Amino acid sequence: MSVNSYEKPDFWSKKAFSEGYPARSVYKLKEINEKYNLFTKNAHVLDLGSAPGSWSVFILRTLGETGKLVSADLKPLAKNVKGNNLVFFQGDLYDESLRERIRLQGPYDAVVCDAAPPTTGNRLIDTSRSADLVDLAFDYAKTMLKAGGNFAVKIFQGSDTRALTANMKDLFEVSRSFKPAACRSESFETYLIGMQKKDGCI
C-alpha cells in the first residue's frame, strides 16, 4: 500500500468536506454513537486526541446549545471548530498539569478517543504504540467518567487487544469491539466500546 492511497480523497473524505467536517473520521463516531448511544443532548463529553476536530464538531452538533464538550490534543483544532460550550486544551495528554485541568472540567458522561500514534509501517511497533494510547485514554475514563458513563477508543488490533478488552470488562457493565464502515478496508484499526461504567470503579 502506498502512502498516497491514504492521501487520495475517498467517498468518506469528500462527504466530510461537503458537510463541514475537517476529516472523514467523523463517520466512525457517528456510526458508533448511533449504535451505542454514547452521548445525547445535555451530556458532558471529553474528546481526547481531538485535532483536527471532526469528532468535536459532531459532538457539538449533537449537543446543540446544551451540554458541554472538553477537547484536548497536542495540535490545535481547525479554525472552524468552535462552540460556546467547547473548552479546548492544547498539550500533551501525558502531562499531569493538563490532566488536572481536564479533570477539573469533569466529571464526564462520555469519554471518546480517536488518537493514533505516528505509524512506522512495522505492525508490531504500531500496535504497541496504539496500545499505550488506549491505556492512557482508559485511565482518563477510569478516573474522570461518572458512574454509568460511556467510553470509546480507537485501537490497532494486535497482541495487546485481549488484555485491553479484559480491562474494559472490569470497568464497564458492557464492553464491545466494533469496526465502523468508514474505516478503510486495509486498516487494522477498530474501536473498543465500554458502556455503563461500574459504580465505585476509580
Image: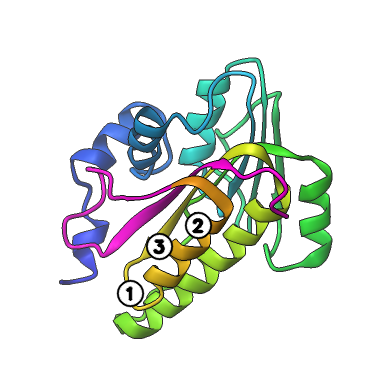
Residue 98 percent across, percent down from the top left:
78, 58
Amino acid at the residue labelled 1: Gly
C-alpha separation, residue under disc 3 versus residue under disc 2: 13 Å
Which image quarter: residue 142? bottom right
Q: Nearer the viewer, residue 185 or 15?
A: 185
**Looking at the image, is 55 positioned above or below residue 40?**
below
Residue lying furthest top: 65
C-alpha separation, residue under disc 2 versus residue under disc 1: 16 Å
Q: Residues within 10 Å of mark 2 (few under 14, many from 20)?
A: many
Q: Residues within 10 Å of mark 3 (few under 14, many from 20)?
A: many
Query: Does the magenta portion include 88?
Result: no
Residue 70 percent across, percent down from the top left:
68, 40
Q: Residues within 10 Å of mark 1 (few under 14, many from 20)?
A: some
**Looking at the image, is 3 positioned above or below residue 169?**
below
Quick one: quadrant of the N terminus? bottom left
Which image quarter: residue 162? bottom left
Element marked by disc 1: loop
* Magenta-highlighted residues: 175-202
The residue indicated by pointer 1 is: 158
Q: Can residue 50 be seen in this snapshot?
A: no
Residue 28 percent across, percent down from the top left:
34, 42
The residue indicated by pointer 2 is: 168
Q: Residue at x 79, y 49 (%)?
A: 103
Element marked by disc 2: helix
